[in-house]
Amino acid sequence: MSESATPPDEAAALEWRDVTVTYGARVRADADTARTVAVADLSLRVERGGTVGIAGESGCGKSTLVSTVLRLLPRSADVAGQVLLDGEDVGAMTWGRLRAVRWAEASIVFQGAMHALNPVRTVRHQVAEALELHLAKAYPTDAARSARVDELLALVDLPAAKAASYPHELSGGQKQRVMIAMALVCDPDVIIADEPTTALDVVVQAQVLEVLAGLVRERGLTLVMISHDLAVLAAVCERIVVMREGRIVEEGPSRRVLDAPEHPHTRELAAAFPVIGDPASRRPARAAGEPVLPTGDDAALLEVRDLVVDFRARGTTIRAVDHVSLACAPGEIVALVGQSGSGKTTLARAVLGLQQPTSGEVAYAGKPLPRRRAALTAYRRAVQFVLQDPSASLNPKHTVYDAVAEGLRIHKVADEEARVRQALTQAELTPPEAFFGAIPSELSGGQRQRVVIAGALALEPTFLVADEPVASLDASVRGEILDLLLRLNRELGLGALVITHDLGLAWNIADRVVVMHQGRIVENGTCEQVLLDPQHDYTKSLLAVVPSALEVRA
Amino acid sequence: MTIASNDAVTVAADDTPRGASLRRYVAVKAGGALISLAMVVVLGFFAFRVLPGDPVRTMTQGRQVTPEQLEGLRRQLGLDDPLLVQFWNYLRDLATGDLGQSYVYKNSSVAELIADRLLPTLLLTGTAAAISVVLGLWLGQRTAWRRGSWFDKVHTGLALTFWSVPTFWLGLLLLLVFGGGLGWFPTTGMTTAGAGYTGVEHVLDVAHHLVLPVITMVAVVYAQYLMVMRASVLEEMHSDYLTTARAKGLRDDLVRTRHAVPNALLPTVTLIFLTVGGLVGGAVTVESVFSWPGLGYLTYQALSEPDLPLLQGTFVVFSAIVILMNFVADLVYRVLDPRLRSA
């Protein structure tokens, strides 16, 4: 510490003073954009025992900002300004001092515990490792360290037996709990949680947040939490800071930021996670002259009748889909919601003819789905599929033109170029010619998903099956893609089965909501019926854990 | 909460008894190895029947023989039988461990010849393999961790240069300089002829003879271990769990040895065993250059005849070693990677 202006007892637990982080240009060829600014002249003070949430889209610099606390940025990053941890300048620490501070004074719950845990080490080994490094005197023996690991696992509601597990033997929620236990092992003052619940489904997310919030409250920890979801932050933090392009655009008490956002960007973030029941985030009502929803099952375009899908693995049979019946009318948007493992994706695969049902059948336009390959081809032309992650579902070496034209070639459709042009225009990639030669890595996430949608549209389908179509997209892009889906629905009469774990998405666009739980459909009704007046206990419990409905700390 | 059962389901599915799963795994892999071996036995017979050259002519080269004598020799060797009968005899003999009689070494059976030569080959290739694996892996992870440093550049450059050098050329060069020129090391064989050393002296004598062939082999092969380990560590370099390890306050070299290396070893191990098996076959050149009394040298001699039973024998033995190594690789991989243990 050289010039500490504030006396030590007044030092904040964590403080950023005029911090600017730039990334080096070694990876980039063009010298003009020599350095990318990730964090721009940012100051933020987190008081002892304070809980602050940092919100923003991917690329806004929020992860870079918290990485400065333990100096974990790659060598190409250049940090200017001061980061003070308990009044001590992190940037001025020697390597030895820094290593002593890491994890002992501040620890991190990393994003995606899936990758943040070493796959070939047991949980016990990984949690105890930090004890061995920092608290060797307090826990001198393996037995003492093991006892401490058990104690921490109990704290995050995991049985002690899990200590002997390897990460792949745990579920996503359990891994995230192990991450939290690991972060607490040395009793640090500051905990940084980087998207601790992204990639978890709502129910598990609620459980993990509960554990985290409880621990922070009981132990008076200082918490800095990052998320793109304002409601998640509001559930745990007193204060929310909204970042955009490396700067803070809004800051205030959680309740206020959530209920009355001032900056347009905050409003955009808030809109991406709609409050169920709020008419403003509901799809516009159908105007006169638009396709009218037929009623009655006989008019169904796509029908699933008493479908059962079993998976056999080593003698045991797992029933993924259990006597499900479902009907989608022409032009109707149906949201199929459920937790991961509820069988919703298996159902969708069966609908597409990708999964042979054990019994029951899928019927399209009144006719049962053919089993022969040639006949299936015709069916697949009418029913198209949009996958979750466009970066994974597009071949990275194929140009946009090839990606869109592939379906046309398979189905031997004439007039290829005109159809590709039309599909790209419908997917709002204009002018279409500008995108013909592009490869996926040159496009943004939203543009990629549009290419996937264009690929589906090129065949002029009458029905679309979309598996989590916006889950991998940022808040602002999410809205655009949903608008696109609604417009296609309105103008082309395109019906859709949208599979999602996100009840907010269902509220955004669906005509009808079908709730699936352990392979069965437990509730089926109009969007308003199911989401505003749920009948089944499972639907109620799902709605109860949606962050926007969680009780917000005042 | 009624719906929290999801976690329990995933875990229950994993709880198959480990012992049963292990037995099953070993049985499947061993079965695969045996099938491969059976294919080798069949292939070994027919492949060498396609070779050009008439063994009977070679055997009688430089001597006056009548067509009747040639015919008699053919009958004696069983070469006049139909191919399928010959194959049946070969299989029947093989079942009793009889690999046949060498055409060239008239007084020894193939099995005896191979038994005599196996140990020297295993000594040479085993030593060379151990040294090149240790050297390659160690250099590989160091060069990856300091990617772009002078250490990296020098070592990858050097390794690739040796890798590109023809084995026999390097062997001859070493032989000329350190054997012939400087006279530091013996030039042929495994022991000093006629010295009759015993005990420690014998061991030292063999070790002395071993130096040049081992250096030749190591120099030519260690690059592949270095490059694979380097690539494998580089792949792990940006893994999130390494950031976790750093954030915990681990020293840089502990992050490497405790977290990066165990993960990087996984893809490397398979390759190591694959190539170590292959090294035994690769010994042909080195053994020929240094007149090392091993299987490789024997194969080289058998090829020039062609001594069919001997070739079949060495072919089966070389292949068996490769298959065995692959089997071991599967077992070791399972020990190293906990994710495979439940599979």
Image (spheres, coloured by chain):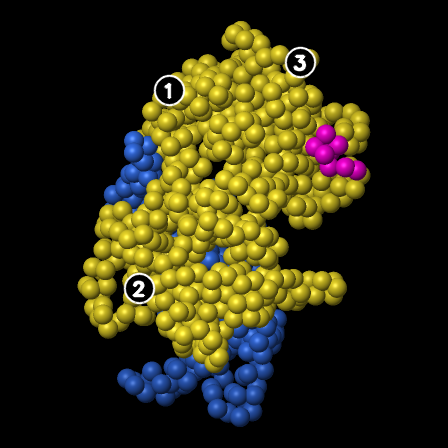
Chain colours: A yellow, B blue
User: Compared to B38, does A127 lie above or below?
Assistant: below
A8 or A493: nearer the viewer: A8
Please name the residue shown 35% across and 30% down the image.
Answer: A541
Q: Name the residue under label 3.
A: A288
Q: Which residue carries the number 1 mark?
A: A535
Q: How crowded is mark 2: few (under 14 residues within 10 Å), some or many (20 or more)?
A: many
Instruction: Specify start and end residues of the magenta stretch as a single range.
Output: A424-431
Q: Which residue is drawn at 61% across and 44% down?
A: A264
The mark lying in front, picked from 2 and 1, is 1
As drawn, A81 above or below A258: below
Q: Are marks 3 and 1 on the same chain?
A: yes
Q: In which quarter of the image is the C terminus of chain A?
A: top left
Decide whether residue A238 is among the magenta residues.
Answer: no
> How would you classify the magenta stretch by its main secondary structure?
loop
Report the residue marked by disc 2: A186
Q: Which amino acid does label 2 sit on?
A: Cys
The N terminus of chain A, quarter of image:
bottom left
Residue drawn 43% across the image and 30% down it: A338
Residue at 30% from the left image edge and 38% from the top image edge: B8
Mark in front: 3 vs 2: 3
Q: In front here: B65 or A550?
A: A550
Q: Mark 2 lies on which chain?
A: A
> Which numbered disc, 2 or 1, marks the residue that appears first in the sequence?
2
N-terminal of the pair, mark 3 or mark 1, is: 3
Figure label count? 3
Question: A125 above or below B166?
Answer: above
Which percent across, then down, holds residue A49? 36, 58
Gap in angstroms between the C-alphas marked 3 and 2: 64 Å
- Mark 3 or mark 2: whose residue is earlier in sequence: 2
